[in-house]
Image: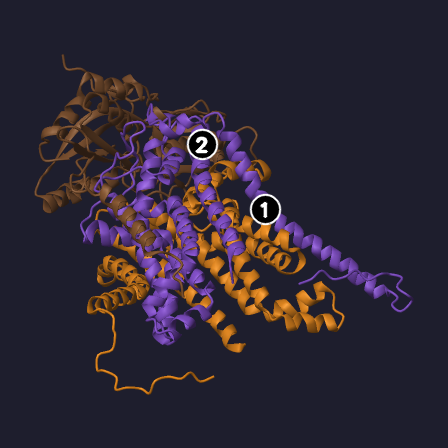
Amino acid sequence: MRIPVSRASTASCFIALTAVVCASFPSAGCGSKRAPAIATTIQVKGSDTMVNIAQAWAEEYKKVEPGVEVEVSGGGSGVGIAALEKGTIDIADASRNMKPDEIAQAKRNTGKEPKEFIVGYDALAVYVNKDNPLDEVTLDQLASVFAEGGTVARWSQLGVTIPGVSDNTIVRVSRQSSSGTYEFFREHVLNKRDFKLGSRDMNGSKEVVELVGNTKTAIGYSGMGYATPSVKMLRLARKAGEPAIAPTVEHALNKSYPLARSLQVYTLGEPEGAVKKYVEWMLSETGQKILQESGYVPIPHQN
Amino acid sequence: MTAHLPPPTHTPDRRPSRGALAVFGERVLENVIRLSGVSAIFFVLAIFFFVFREAAPVLVSDSFSLKEFLFSVAWYPTSDINVRYGILGLIVGTACVSGLAVLIAVPFSLGSAIFIAEFCGPRLREGLKVVIELLAAIPSVVWGFIGLTVMSRLIVAVTGAPVGVNVLNGGIILALMCVPIITSIAEDALKAVPDSYREAALALGATRWQTVHRVLVPAARTGLLAAVLLGVGRAVGETMAVLMATGHAVHIPSSVLDSVRTLTANIAAELGEASVNSEHYRVLFLTGVLLFLITFVINLTADLVVRGVRRER
Amino acid sequence: MAREPAVPVESAGKFRETAAGRGHRRTEALVRGVFMTMAAAMVLPLLLLVAYLIVKAAPVLSLEFLLDVPRRGMRAGGIWPALVGTVYLVLGALVVSAPIGVMAAIYLKEYARDNAFHRAVNMAVINLAGVPSIVHALFGLGAFVYAARFGYSIVSASLTLAIMTMPVIITSTREALNAVPHAFREACWNVGATRWQTIRGVVLPNSISGILTGVILEVSRTAGETAPIMFTGAVFFKAVQRGDLLPYGLNDQAMALSMHLYTLSTQVPDVPEALPYATAVVLLGTVLTMNALSIALRFWLRSRKRW
């Protein structure tokens, strides 16, 4: 009986496989690529509102410091804060502030207290389709649309008729609960009441705007940097009778716009080394210019 | 034919044997193989163990009610004022999308399976089987992308619905994903019917269609049932496609054109934000346990059904 | 089953077609047409979808697209880091699941007796294949990221993928082993070979191509998975040099094609339409090519069989 396949070829197969495996092992344990000098990785996670600036920063920073790798992921402010509490990332992006129990949890898990850095400002805009005749709305009206127990379900109740649609049920577009945008809206518009069930809870800021742009009867909220030509942003009034303010850069800075918010990053304790340089770079003129180009409001210059 | 052999002499005690190292090495290797063999059971148990371990504490906690979990629609895990964990809306969402998917897929799959098994020539059969395999290979994220872009525009254009991501969208995409698995297993079931049945029918003068619907389908019905069950299992367990195509609304849908959220999409959407070991985190893992149990039961049923068939023969 | 011979209407006067017979033939033709339409309804979507995707992706598809890194906030440029990341993840999963999967199949086919325990093992393989991908993600999170402390890394993601796709290798290897005629094994045993010697010397060499088919299939499945890696090691963005072949260490997170498609279509604003379509085409193209390869391999094997 002849053995068809020689032992030599099987052996050589194994050797080849082992060689491939061994070739990838040297980089294990170093923690990053085989870059020149000390290679470090900075892990950034969190706000979906900020993920695009974070990514733009990471891309630009590679040119500034080639030895530093910045890994960016989104998922929502909640995701970043949860990871920071666990100590698995270096910087958490958040479009809302950390809650006291989250800070306490971080301290319990890692022994360090999270440090906040405000890296920019944003206006949370309320979007409607460009064919919607509505131009301004009060916070109370928004609450009656979005909040649990709110009574407004049709556009006719707001006195609005949208041309060309037969069914004027309001299509509410919201964000998923991991989003800092969601939490900010809930706190400042709904006064901590819960959202009404049945809103379409989108994954990301851009999806909200896209959906509103494609749906005549939709209303949604997202960062003002995500506007597209098929939507328009409503002017907001704090109460009926007060003037309605549009979401613009200056209104966000002088806080006249009711839903102006700060964008912040959190580190565990005082940042050191590469992370410190990165945060400083984000706050520098180059970093802020990138922020502005992405459609957000830079920190006012301290002269 | 007897050869002239010398008479057997006294055989020495030592027989030529393989080296001790070779024998030892072989034993070791066989034990490694045995270990790998049972690894599948080990992995399934490990999956259940690790998922259940993260979920378990919430089952015994005071603030959590299993009844509210299973029967309430209100899902507010991050509420500031009133935390509620009700997954009924999600269960209904999963049921609607999977149900619609199976409803659409079963006629097409069974029809195709019958066509492939009984009505077409060998060349066409090979071609169709290749197509089915390729259809099965499409990654779920690509399907989700198609649902998000192509299908939603199609649905809005055809039905005039306000939003294109809804139960119908998810149902159609899932149906396209289930069709390959149902078709291939159904075709196997039809082929497994012994030829004697067909020959007997032919001898009685039956046309092929009569053979199919009076003899073959009833004979293969348990295998066809198993095929449908496995398709259901696939639909229920799908994550990425429904995450992108169903619209994420937590409520009981009012129509096929309404958005829903499924159990799988809910976990995927909220897992990242739940801080580890928080109640929200554990409830999400509990949802995972529920999903595991549902698909386990479906697979077990399908397997028992098929085993029953085999024992009958 | 052979084609039914057409009944000649006039055949020596012995058989005359009745009205019932004509009715049956009409029903038969109708039914055949219906079923053929149903089968076509499966084929057409596949072809239309692939065509549509390619057409939409055409403006951006090029070699440059594959080699370049994402630029301008991922709104331009290419998908190189995602491509490399997927290769890393797939190889990592393969290195773990191929040996274990092949050995498991060898055990189940060659060593296991048909008793309740082994039926349970078979059930476990089927169940492993049926577990939802998000539950695999939960498992990967609980077991590898936290319990084993690998953290969010390629290691965690590869291990999760390995367990997820192992049933594919087990099933194809089992089929390949089944295809080797039992007579071969009996011949070996008759000349006194041990079970392992039989396997190594005769069974494996004759089924190696079938095993290879299974490996290719597994690679294609692993490349397409998103949910398991989303929570264990895939990342939104990582700056990488263009054309860099070894940009990731095993403890790093990686970009991946499937994850990249997901983020491009749901999280990056103002993306030119062609980009996510092009990513989808690359992913789909890779997966379908590998599947076609494995199908072709199977065909070639069948023609080469000497028994």
Foreground pick, B164 / B310:
B310
Tell me which amino acid carries mark 1. Val
Q: Where residue C278 is drawn, which disc sits there?
A: 2
- The chain drawn in brown is A
- The chain drawn in orange is B
Q: For this view, does B163 lie left or right of residue C243?
A: right
Q: Residues within 10 Å of mark 1 (few under 14, many from 20)?
A: some
Task: Read off the residue under disc 1.
Answer: C43
Q: Does the CB distance between marks 1 and 2 fall below 8 Å? A: no
Q: For this view, does C305 lie left or right of residue B240?
A: right
Foreground pick, A22 / A202:
A22
Between the C-alphas of marks 1 and 2, the distance is 22 Å
Label 2 residue SS: helix
Chain at tag 1: C
- The chain drawn in purple is C
Tell me which amino acid carries mark 2. Ala
Q: Is residue B9 visible?
A: yes
Chain at tag 2: C
Residue B115 image offset from top left, x and y in percent: 64, 57
Residue C307 image offset from top left, x and y in percent: 52, 63
**Residue at x 51% of width, y 60% of height:** C306
Residue A218 image offset from top left, x and y in percent: 45, 34
Label 1 residue SS: helix
Residue B140 image offset from top left, x and y in percent: 43, 46
Q: Can you say whether C169 is above or below B248 in the image?
A: below
**Residue at x 57% of width, y 43% of height:** C45
Q: Residues within 10 Å of mark 2 (few under 14, many from 20)?
A: many
Sequence order check, earlier mark of 1 and 2: 1
